Amino acid sequence: MSWWRRLLGGGRSGERSGTEQPAAIPAPPTTEQIVTSVDAVMARATGRAPAAVTARVQRVAETVHEMAPRLDRLGAGSQQAHTVVATATSYLPEAVDAYLRLPRDFADRRVVDRGKTSLMILCDQLDLLGATLDKISDAVSRADAVALVAHGRFLEEKFGTSSGLALPGPSSGGPTPGPAPLEAP
Protein backbone atom coordinates (compact mmCIF):
# COMPACT_ATOMS: atom_id res chain seq x y z
CA MET A 1 0.00 0.00 0.00
CA SER A 2 1.28 3.44 -0.86
CA TRP A 3 1.91 6.14 1.70
CA TRP A 4 -0.70 8.24 -0.14
CA ARG A 5 -3.48 5.71 0.54
CA ARG A 6 -2.46 5.46 4.20
CA LEU A 7 -2.54 9.26 4.45
CA LEU A 8 -6.06 9.30 3.05
CA GLY A 9 -7.25 6.73 5.55
CA GLY A 10 -6.56 3.43 3.84
CA GLY A 11 -4.12 1.92 6.34
CA ARG A 12 -3.20 -1.80 6.38
CA SER A 13 -5.31 -2.60 9.41
CA GLY A 14 -8.32 -0.87 7.89
CA GLU A 15 -7.96 -2.34 4.38
CA ARG A 16 -10.98 -3.97 2.88
CA SER A 17 -11.04 -6.50 0.20
CA GLY A 18 -12.84 -5.34 -2.89
CA THR A 19 -13.95 -1.83 -3.58
CA GLU A 20 -12.87 1.27 -1.72
CA GLN A 21 -15.37 3.86 -0.62
CA PRO A 22 -14.65 7.48 -1.51
CA ALA A 23 -13.82 9.88 1.28
CA ALA A 24 -16.89 11.72 2.55
CA ILE A 25 -16.98 15.40 1.71
CA PRO A 26 -18.33 17.47 4.59
CA ALA A 27 -21.48 19.44 3.94
CA PRO A 28 -21.06 23.21 3.65
CA PRO A 29 -22.01 25.15 6.77
CA THR A 30 -25.61 26.24 7.07
CA THR A 31 -26.70 29.86 7.38
CA GLU A 32 -27.24 29.26 11.10
CA GLN A 33 -23.72 27.84 11.56
CA ILE A 34 -22.17 30.77 9.67
CA VAL A 35 -24.03 33.34 11.76
CA THR A 36 -23.33 31.46 14.99
CA SER A 37 -19.62 31.49 14.20
CA VAL A 38 -19.40 35.29 13.86
CA ASP A 39 -21.62 35.77 16.91
CA ALA A 40 -19.24 33.59 18.93
CA VAL A 41 -16.27 35.72 17.83
CA MET A 42 -18.15 38.87 18.80
CA ALA A 43 -18.92 37.39 22.21
CA ARG A 44 -15.26 36.44 22.78
CA ALA A 45 -14.02 39.89 21.76
CA THR A 46 -16.57 41.89 23.78
CA GLY A 47 -15.03 43.00 27.05
CA ARG A 48 -11.63 41.50 26.22
CA ALA A 49 -10.59 43.58 23.22
CA PRO A 50 -10.45 47.35 22.77
CA ALA A 51 -13.42 49.18 21.27
CA ALA A 52 -11.50 49.56 17.99
CA VAL A 53 -11.48 45.77 17.63
CA THR A 54 -15.07 45.13 18.73
CA ALA A 55 -16.39 47.83 16.38
CA ARG A 56 -14.60 46.20 13.45
CA VAL A 57 -15.74 42.71 14.44
CA GLN A 58 -19.29 44.09 14.70
CA ARG A 59 -19.02 45.51 11.16
CA VAL A 60 -17.91 42.14 9.79
CA ALA A 61 -20.58 40.30 11.81
CA GLU A 62 -23.36 42.58 10.53
CA THR A 63 -22.30 42.04 6.93
CA VAL A 64 -22.12 38.27 7.45
CA HIS A 65 -25.60 38.34 9.02
CA GLU A 66 -26.85 40.17 5.94
CA MET A 67 -25.00 37.95 3.46
CA ALA A 68 -25.43 34.45 4.91
CA PRO A 69 -29.05 33.99 3.81
CA ARG A 70 -28.19 35.38 0.36
CA LEU A 71 -25.21 33.13 -0.42
CA ASP A 72 -27.29 31.03 -2.82
CA ARG A 73 -27.49 34.08 -5.12
CA LEU A 74 -23.73 33.87 -5.63
CA GLY A 75 -23.97 30.40 -7.16
CA ALA A 76 -22.64 27.02 -6.13
CA GLY A 77 -18.87 26.97 -5.89
CA SER A 78 -18.64 30.76 -6.09
CA GLN A 79 -15.38 32.28 -4.87
CA GLN A 80 -17.37 35.10 -3.31
CA ALA A 81 -19.59 32.68 -1.35
CA HIS A 82 -16.48 30.83 -0.23
CA THR A 83 -14.96 34.12 0.96
CA VAL A 84 -18.03 34.95 3.06
CA VAL A 85 -18.11 31.46 4.63
CA ALA A 86 -14.35 31.36 5.20
CA THR A 87 -14.41 34.83 6.75
CA ALA A 88 -17.12 33.80 9.21
CA THR A 89 -15.76 30.38 10.08
CA SER A 90 -12.00 30.75 9.70
CA TYR A 91 -10.42 34.13 8.88
CA LEU A 92 -12.26 36.20 11.49
CA PRO A 93 -12.08 33.69 14.36
CA GLU A 94 -8.39 32.92 13.75
CA ALA A 95 -7.37 36.59 13.64
CA VAL A 96 -9.33 37.61 16.74
CA ASP A 97 -8.40 34.51 18.73
CA ALA A 98 -4.69 34.95 17.96
CA TYR A 99 -4.91 38.51 19.26
CA LEU A 100 -6.87 37.50 22.37
CA ARG A 101 -4.22 34.90 23.30
CA LEU A 102 -1.62 37.65 23.68
CA PRO A 103 -1.15 39.52 26.94
CA ARG A 104 -3.00 42.85 26.58
CA ASP A 105 0.01 45.05 27.32
CA PHE A 106 2.15 43.20 24.77
CA ALA A 107 -0.59 43.12 22.13
CA ASP A 108 -1.49 46.77 22.42
CA ARG A 109 1.91 48.40 22.97
CA ARG A 110 4.77 46.23 21.72
CA VAL A 111 5.79 46.74 18.09
CA VAL A 112 5.98 43.35 16.38
CA ASP A 113 6.08 43.98 12.62
CA ARG A 114 6.98 46.99 10.46
CA GLY A 115 6.34 49.50 13.21
CA LYS A 116 2.94 48.09 14.13
CA THR A 117 1.59 46.52 17.30
CA SER A 118 -0.53 43.37 17.28
CA LEU A 119 -3.57 45.60 17.85
CA MET A 120 -2.77 47.66 14.75
CA ILE A 121 -2.18 44.52 12.69
CA LEU A 122 -5.49 43.03 13.82
CA CYS A 123 -7.33 46.28 13.00
CA ASP A 124 -5.78 46.25 9.51
CA GLN A 125 -6.88 42.63 9.02
CA LEU A 126 -10.42 43.37 10.22
CA ASP A 127 -10.62 46.42 7.95
CA LEU A 128 -9.58 44.27 5.00
CA LEU A 129 -12.18 41.61 5.83
CA GLY A 130 -14.86 44.27 6.25
CA ALA A 131 -14.03 45.98 2.95
CA THR A 132 -13.96 42.65 1.11
CA LEU A 133 -17.35 41.62 2.49
CA ASP A 134 -18.78 45.05 1.63
CA LYS A 135 -17.70 44.59 -2.00
CA ILE A 136 -19.31 41.15 -2.14
CA SER A 137 -22.51 42.46 -0.55
CA ASP A 138 -22.62 45.34 -3.03
CA ALA A 139 -22.17 42.92 -5.94
CA VAL A 140 -25.08 40.74 -4.77
CA SER A 141 -27.29 43.78 -4.19
CA ARG A 142 -26.35 45.20 -7.59
CA ALA A 143 -27.29 41.90 -9.25
CA ASP A 144 -30.65 41.94 -7.45
CA ALA A 145 -31.23 45.55 -8.55
CA VAL A 146 -30.38 44.68 -12.16
CA ALA A 147 -32.86 41.79 -12.01
CA LEU A 148 -35.53 44.15 -10.67
CA VAL A 149 -34.90 46.64 -13.48
CA ALA A 150 -35.01 43.86 -16.08
CA HIS A 151 -38.30 42.61 -14.64
CA GLY A 152 -39.73 46.12 -14.76
CA ARG A 153 -38.77 46.42 -18.41
CA PHE A 154 -40.36 43.05 -19.13
CA LEU A 155 -43.58 44.21 -17.45
CA GLU A 156 -43.49 47.46 -19.40
CA GLU A 157 -43.13 45.58 -22.68
CA LYS A 158 -45.76 43.05 -21.73
CA PHE A 159 -48.41 45.31 -20.24
CA GLY A 160 -47.34 48.93 -20.70
CA THR A 161 -48.43 49.54 -24.27
CA SER A 162 -51.52 47.35 -24.44
CA SER A 163 -53.13 48.70 -21.26
CA GLY A 164 -52.19 52.31 -21.81
CA LEU A 165 -50.02 52.38 -18.67
CA ALA A 166 -46.36 53.20 -18.90
CA LEU A 167 -43.77 52.68 -16.21
CA PRO A 168 -41.42 55.57 -15.51
CA GLY A 169 -38.11 55.00 -17.11
CA PRO A 170 -35.44 56.53 -19.27
CA SER A 171 -37.79 56.83 -22.27
CA SER A 172 -40.85 58.17 -20.48
CA GLY A 173 -39.80 61.75 -19.77
CA GLY A 174 -41.87 62.19 -16.62
CA PRO A 175 -43.99 60.68 -13.90
CA THR A 176 -46.47 57.97 -14.68
CA PRO A 177 -50.03 59.24 -14.72
CA GLY A 178 -52.27 57.77 -12.05
CA PRO A 179 -55.03 55.34 -12.88
CA ALA A 180 -57.96 56.67 -14.87
CA PRO A 181 -60.99 57.50 -12.74
CA LEU A 182 -63.65 54.83 -12.74
CA GLU A 183 -66.86 55.78 -14.48
CA ALA A 184 -70.19 55.10 -12.80
CA PRO A 185 -72.30 52.53 -14.66
Image (cartoon, rainbow, N blue to C red):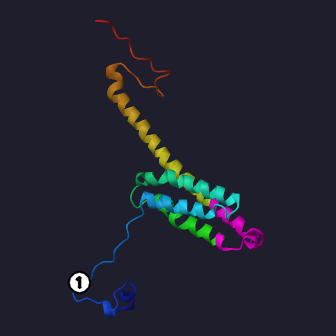
Image quadrant in which you'd find residue 97: bottom right
Vertical placement of residue 141 versus 86, above or below: above
For numbered disc 1, what is the local secondary structure? Answer: loop
Highlighted magenta segment, given as a residue range: 100-126
Q: Residue at x 52, y 55 (%)?
A: 64
The C terminus: image quadrant: top left
Q: How many marks?
A: 1
Residue 91 visible at all: yes
Residue 76 as seen in the image, left or right of residue 139: left
Estimate the x, y position of residue 107 in percent, counting from the top left: 72, 71
Q: As rendered, which of 138 and 53 lies closer to the eye?
A: 53
Q: As rendered, which of 8 and 52 lies closer to the eye?
A: 52
Magenta residues, dominant SS class: helix
Vertical placement of residue 161 versus 44, above or below: above
Q: Which residue is mark 1?
A: 19
Q: As rendered, which of 77 and 36 lies closer to the eye?
A: 36
Q: Residue at x 38, y 70 (%)?
A: 26
Q: Amino acid at mark 1?
A: Thr
Q: Dot 1 surroundings within 10 Å: few (below 14), some, or many (20 or more)?
A: few
Estimate the x, y position of residue 55 in percent, counting from the top left: 65, 55
Q: Residue at x 38, y 13 (%)?
A: 180
Residue 156 as seen in the image, left or right of residue 21: right
